[in-house]
Structures are given as structure tokens and as C-alpha cells.
Amino acid sequence: MYEDYQFKLSEEEIYLFYEGTFCYAYKKFGAHAVTENDVSGVRFTVWAPSAIKVGVAGEFNNWQALEHLLVRITNTGIWTAFFPGIQPGDLYKYGIYTLSGEVFLKADPFAFCSEKRPETASIISSKEKYNWGDEQWQKKKVQPYQQPINIYEVHLGSWRRKPDGGFMNYREIAHEMADYALEMGYTHLELLPVMEHPFDDSWGYQVTGYYSVTSRFGTPEDFKYFIDYCHKKGLGIILDWVPSHFCRDEHGLVRFDGTKLYEAGESAQWGTYYFDFSKPEVVSFLISNAIYWFEVFHVDGLRVDAVASMLYLDYGKEENDWVPNKYGGNEQLEAVKFIKKLHETVFRHVRNPLMIAEESTSWPLVTKPTYDGGLGFNYKWNMGWMNDVLEYMSKATNNRKAYHHKITFSFLYTFSENFILPLSHDEVVHGKKALIEKMPGDYWQKFANLRLLFGYMIAHPGKKLIFMGAELAQFHEWRHYEELYWRILEFDMHRSFQQYVKELNHFYLSEKALWEQDHDCNGFSWIEADNSKQSVAVFLRKAQGNSDFLVIVCNFTPVFYEIYQVGVPSGGWYNEIFNSDHELYGGSGQRNLVSLRAIKKPWHKQNYSLGMKLPPLSIVFIRKKN
């Protein structure tokens, strides 16, 4: 057995691993192709404390693990060895021998590449370094709070497919998707999980290979090309990341060394296992994984899935199925500690990252720094806004007056956290209907309502996210097993709607008032909040300094007003600068084509007011002339 000191664990690193602070564990654990004393081979390192023997099985030894046994590092549960002759591309698994006489063949928890499902072996990855070309992107990264963020959420397997129905390669997807997203006015792509997973129907949320980019779409180098290309074009990349639970497939983490090594318990809701956050070694595994995606793949952010399931001991459980913490509460203290340590590590090692929580409860200070008592995320999905606005928009327009609070309540708390407004994949599956199908009314009204919904989201404080296909207004729910129904753009209303989304997005990017003070109450004020009778809402969005402001008027009914009086902060002339009812977007064309004069006539508690055309089911943006 040859020694390779570069990839051998030092005593300090072993200490850090067992302390839960080894954020670069991926550099030492797993299988690393190396050359030592002019001999090429692979060093394997794995954590399996309850095993009595650990070997490596692969094509190179006819899957006989006893031929390549690892050595336990003294007084640890870590096994390691260097074997010559094994090379990149070889398949392997660990043979785990337990005290009870069981023998498991397990995929490597730190595998950097895995076989394409349904095969389950790990693959020795190449030691060649990818030649990145995104230096300019990295240099330009700034803190996100006063910048526009408009996220296009995508599932790589169903955005587009090859003519024969097969998956496109990461490199092929890169060119089509990046160019399309930028043309449409998006700033970031958010990818449903690309970590290796065995079951397509899980959409990637039941992971077996936390360090493996799924082989469905190519190699790790292909995925690096995807990210590199997006960065060079000016598009950020966010990955969905799932530290809350893992799937129960026998080749994965479950009972890895014959004991509950990584898992703390079982989720009846998802048929998966929760991670055991009380184990420092599991914490090192997960925090190292987060750093891995940032440093090795240059991603710009992680959207952490199902945060509530980590925070609460009773999440998704019956009354008698959980035990209170030592203080008698339902908070999972170890998970809270993990989340805080995760963010302290990420923000220490990564420049201006996006750490986003999918968190659906009223847990306080989710997006506040840990030194201020927060969880440390810098963004949180506003699930309350999403649920309220979709419920409101699904109501018949003549009944909306009874639900007016659904579109105004979010403004009471919108500055309590740093929010992203999501219209995500979860809202267009499982019988919930596509967004266009949620809209009431006839064919024309459905499109007008959807234009209004998108415009209202753009106008509301908070960063933005929509799921792919929404911009096409496709009528059927998302189907992960086929590509989006792009042919729907042959129909005028769908093509006009896509054009509307494109121009609305670019309008958003160009207007500082819509994003510069997203998280500051000085960036918003009501003009008319309580007009439930007419279902109209009017408010201001303001850039820094408050001199640059937009008046935003939303009409949530199909009633057209030839003259609608609106209070404004100051006198002078105002111009309509965006109108969802434009004919080009499929609207009725009721626009304010001439300048509007605001006179000294108090209205809506403002000292001045103007009269304007207010189209049916519309949103209109107005700016004062200089």
C-alpha cells in the first residue's frame, strides 16, 4: 500500500471532523485519483465507525471487497487506504462488514460522480482541473439586497428535451437556457436538485449522492461548463439543496455501517430519513457539502429545502410521535445549531452568497445574522404572500371584495424579513392547476388576471421567482417526464403573454424603485389600501432618496374606469410607463397615451391627485415627469 500524504487526513482534520467544523471534508474523504512516488492510484477514505471491516469493491477486483481492504485510523471510525492501478472512470462501492455478520455494498457518501440510474455504483472522478472563465462574474458579485433579483426556477429534465424525448446534456442546455433566460429578463436560474437521486418522480429531492452531480445530463465537467457559460453571459446559478432528509435506498446513506449512522428518524410524510444533527460528523458532512458546491462548482446560492421540517420536532408528526426538547418545546435545538453554524461557515468562506430558506412558518429572524440572534439566511421565500395572493386571484372577480385583505396583509410584515416572492413548482402540480387555470373568468379574463398577478408580484417589495412554463401560460400542470409545451407559443394569446413577461421583467430590471429598497419600509407607502368595494389597490415604490418613485395602480375586477382619481405626493405631470392592458400583450388597449396632470386636489390622504384611465384587470405604472 502506497502512502499519499496530500490526501491523508491530518490529526487536526480528524479533530475538526469529529468536532463538526471540517468544512473541507470533501478534500480528504471519498475517492481521490492521485500519484504518489510516480505510482498512479486512488486514495479512499470513509467514515464507518461500527464496521469491523471496510473494503473497496469494483470492476478492478470483480466486486470482491476483501481484495482491497481499508485500514482504520487508530482511535477513530475513519477507514482509509491508497491502491495503485485504480483510475478515473472505474466503478466502485464500499463493502461494509458489520458486527452482526451483515455485508453491505454502499455507494460512497462523498462520491463525486455516480452511475446513471437505475445503476447505483460510484465512479472515480477525473483529477483534471476545469479551466474556469468566470473571473469577471466573480469580481462583480456584490451584496444582493439593493440589486434586482428575478429568478427563473427550472427542472433540467423537463425544460427542453431532444427530439427523441431523451435528456439534453448540461452543455447543450447551457446555451439554450442561458440565452433564453437572459432574453426574458431573468437574473438567476434556480435548479431543482441536481444532486444524484435514483427516482425521477422525486424531482431530485430524495438524494443519494450529495457530492455527485446527477449523471442524467452528463459529467461534473459538463455541469461546470453549464455554470461557467451562464456566468460568462451574466446569469447567476442557485441550487436547491436538501439537508433536511435523504432517501431510503439501500445503496445510500441509510444504515451505512449497519447502524443509524447518518439518520435520526424516519419521515412518514416523505418516506425518507432525517439527518441526525446531534452528530458532529453529520454536521461536517453537510457543511462541507455546501462549501463544495460553492467552491468546486462556483454556484452563487443555495435554496435550502423544507427548513421547517428541520426546525420543529413535531413537523408532520402526530401528537404522540415526538418528544419535546430539554426545555419542553418543539424546537429541534440541534438543527437550529446546525443551521447557524452552516451560515457562519458559508459567509466566512464564500463571497456574497445567496442562502435562501424555504420556510413556511412564523419562526422569527430567519434572515437575520446569527450574531443578531437570527438563523443566518439572507433570504426567505414568502410563502404567506404566495398562498394569499393565489387564493385571492382564484376568486371570482365579483367576490374579491370579501377577500381584499389577502392582497394587503403581506405589506404589514414584508419588511420583517428579506423575502423572495415565489410562484414555484409546488403550486402547479398535484391537482393545484397551472397558474393560468387558477385564474377565473373567460379566456380573455384568464390572461388579463395572469398579467395582473405577474405585474403585482413585480410591484410588491421583495425579490422575484417564477417556475418555468408560467411565462408561457401553459394550461396543463407541470409534467416532469416531458418538456414544456413550447408549441403553445403558436397561439396568439400565449405568444403575447410571453412577450408581456419579457417586457415586464426588463421593466423591473430598469426601475430602481422596484428593487433598491426592497427590504426597507422607506421604499413603500400606501396611497389606497382599503378600497375593497372596487377591488383597487394603489401604492408607491421608491428608490433610495425617495425622489424617484412609481405610482402603481391595480384593478382586480373587469370594470373599466374612464376616469379614476388617484392621490399622488406632488403636483405636476405624470406619464404612464407600463400598462398590462397594452394590445401587444393581449389586452384591451385602454392606455393613458397623454401626460396626466396632478392638481392641488387632496385625495387618498395625498395633497394632489390626477385622473387616469384604469383598464379592466390591469396594473398600471406611472412616473412623474422631470
Image (cartoon, helix red, strand yellow):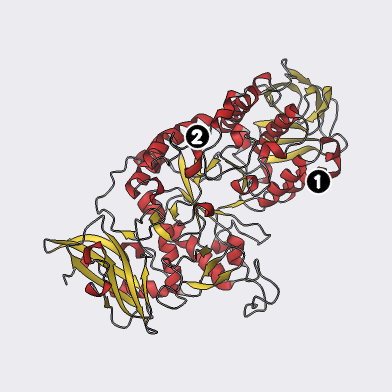
Q: Nearer the viewer, residue 244 or 11?
A: 244
Where residue 280 sits, quadrant-wise, is: bottom left
Residue 186 is situated, as x and y percent measured from the top left of the image, at 53, 36
Q: Residue at x 81, y 46 (%)?
A: 405
Q: Residues within 10 Å of mark 1 (few under 14, many from 20)?
A: some
Q: Residue furthest toward the left?
A: 38
Residue that badge 1 annotates: 405
Q: Nearer the viewer, mark 2 or mark 1?
A: 2
Where residue 10 sits, quadrant-wise, is: bottom left
Position above or below: 150 against 3: above
Residue 381 is situated, as x and y percent measured from the top left of the image, at 61, 51
- Mark before the other along the chain sequence, 2 or 1: 2
Question: Left or right: where does residue 500 sit relative to residue 31?
Answer: right
Report the quarter where the N terminus lies. bottom left
Q: Residues within 10 Å of mark 2 (few under 14, many from 20)?
A: some
Q: Nearer the viewer, residue 403 or 623?
A: 403
Label 2 and label 1: CA atoms lie apart by 34 Å
Q: Can the viewer see residue 355? A: no
Question: Left or right: where does residue 80 sit relative to residue 337?
Answer: left
What secondary structure is found at the residue carrying circle 1? helix
Q: Residue at x 50, y 64 (%)?
A: 246
Residue 559 is situated, as x and y percent measured from the top left of the image, at 83, 27
Question: Left or right: where does residue 573 sit relative to residue 424?
Answer: right
Residue that badge 2 annotates: 181
